[in-house]
């Protein structure tokens, strides 16, 4: 009986030891899993690049149309905020082209640190150019007391962009971790700016059309300029590209 008990104790000890060892390994693996984030596989990264290219083409197509309509409507109504909105669409196109350059470099060369950094700087300069233009136009409109005409076309356009842009920005932002791209983050941020800008311009256009508050248009434009300037500086001061594929 003592032998049976001994063997039983030995088996229990071995089982406990194995269980403890398993727990230790499990704890080690659990800690390891939490300590290191899973990196995207090559197929996942390739799929992310293809999706980014697709979203980029949508951005370029939509913003080209948006720019043409907004600039024409802005000139017709004498609306500085609507002109600024059209210029923002032009800047969006330049940002999308910069991102397309980055994605093409990745497909061609694999390592994209240099092109990614240049793309980020180009997007930052686009923000600052937008801020300078719209800010100057808004101040000039306030000083000269130039009331804009009502623009139904501008109201419809900005309302449409206010609905669509947040979805596009969210889709772009979700791809940034898989791409490891600061340029993708900056371009998504610029799309978000377009959504905010749409709301600001829409308020100014509606107040001018409904209440006759002519100054709402240049004030809205000043808000757009300030927001664009902040984003331009933040993008320019972005961290070095330590999270790119070649870092």
Image (cartoon, grey):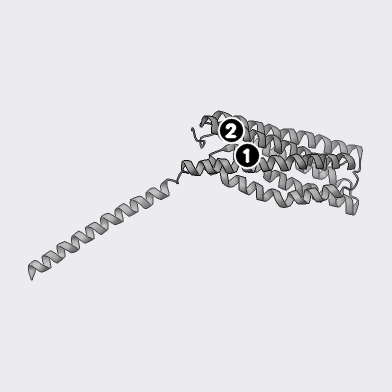
Residue located 87% across and 47% down the image: 151
The mark lying in front, picked from 2 and 1, is 2
**Residue at numbered disc 1:** 186
Residue located 50% across and 35% down the image: 245
Question: Residue 191 occupies which quadrant of the picture?
Answer: top right
Q: Position of residue 112 (x, y in %)?
A: 54, 31
Q: Do tag 2 and tag 1 residues touch (Cβ < 8 Å)?
A: no
Closer to us: 152 or 35? 152
Q: Position of residue 241 (x, y in %)?
A: 54, 34
Residue 52, visible in the rendered structure: yes
Q: Compared with residue 206, is residue 15 higher up or lower down, i.e. above or below?
A: below
Closer to us: 35 or 180? 180
Left or right of 42? Residue 216 is right
Mark 1: give few (<14), some (14-19) or many (20+) Cα within 10 Å: many
Mark sitting on residue 104: 2
Question: Residue 108 occupies which quadrant of the picture?
Answer: top right
Left or right of 202? Residue 242 is left
Mark 2: give few (<14), some (14-19) or many (20+) Cα within 10 Å: some
Closer to us: 215 or 26? 26
Residue located 78% across and 40% down the image: 67
Left or right of 103? Residue 31 is left
- The secondary structure type at the circle numbered 1 is helix
Residue 240, visible in the rendered structure: no
Residue located 50% across and 44% down the image: 44
Going from the N terminus, do you reach mark 2 or mark 1 first?
2
- The secondary structure type at the circle numbered 2 is helix
Question: Residue 125 occupies which quadrant of the picture?
Answer: top right
Q: Compared with residue 36, is residue 13 higher up or lower down, i.e. above or below?
A: below
Q: Label 2 vs label 1: CA separation? A: 17 Å
Q: Position of residue 111 (x, y in %)?
A: 51, 31
- The quarter of the rendered structure image containing the N terminus is bottom left
């Amino acid at each position: 009986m003592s032998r049976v008990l001994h063997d039983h104790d030995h088996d229990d000890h071995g089982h406990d030891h194995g269980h403890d060892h398993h727990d230790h390994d499990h704890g080690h693996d659990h800690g390891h899993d939490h300590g290191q984030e899973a990196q995207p596989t090559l197929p996942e990264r390739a799929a992310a690049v293809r999706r980014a290219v697709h979203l980029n083409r949508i951005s370029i197509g939509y913003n080209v149309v948006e720019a043409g309509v907004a600039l024409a409507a802005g000139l017709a109504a004498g609306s500085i905020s609507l002109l600024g909105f059209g210029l923002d669409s032009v800047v969006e196109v330049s940002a999308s082209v910069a991102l397309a350059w980055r994605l093409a470099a990745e497909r061609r060369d694999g390592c994209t640190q240099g092109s990614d950094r240049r793309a980020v700087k180009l997007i930052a300069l686009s923000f600052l150019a937008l801020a300078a233009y719209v800010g100057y136009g808004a101040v000039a409109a306030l000083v000269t007391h130039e009331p804009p005409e009502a623009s139904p076309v501008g109201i419809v356009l900005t309302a449409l962009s206010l609905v669509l842009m947040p979805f596009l920005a969210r889709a772009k932002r979700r791809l940034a971790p898989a791409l490891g791209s600061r340029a993708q983050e900056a371009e998504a941020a610029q799309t978000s700016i377009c959504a905010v800008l749409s709301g600001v311009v829409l308020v100014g256009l509606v107040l001018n059309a409904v209440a006759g508050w002519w100054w709402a248009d240049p004030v809205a434009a000043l808000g757009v300029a300030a927001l664009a300037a902040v984003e331009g500086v933040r993008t320019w001061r972005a961290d070095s590209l330590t999270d790119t594929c070649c870092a």
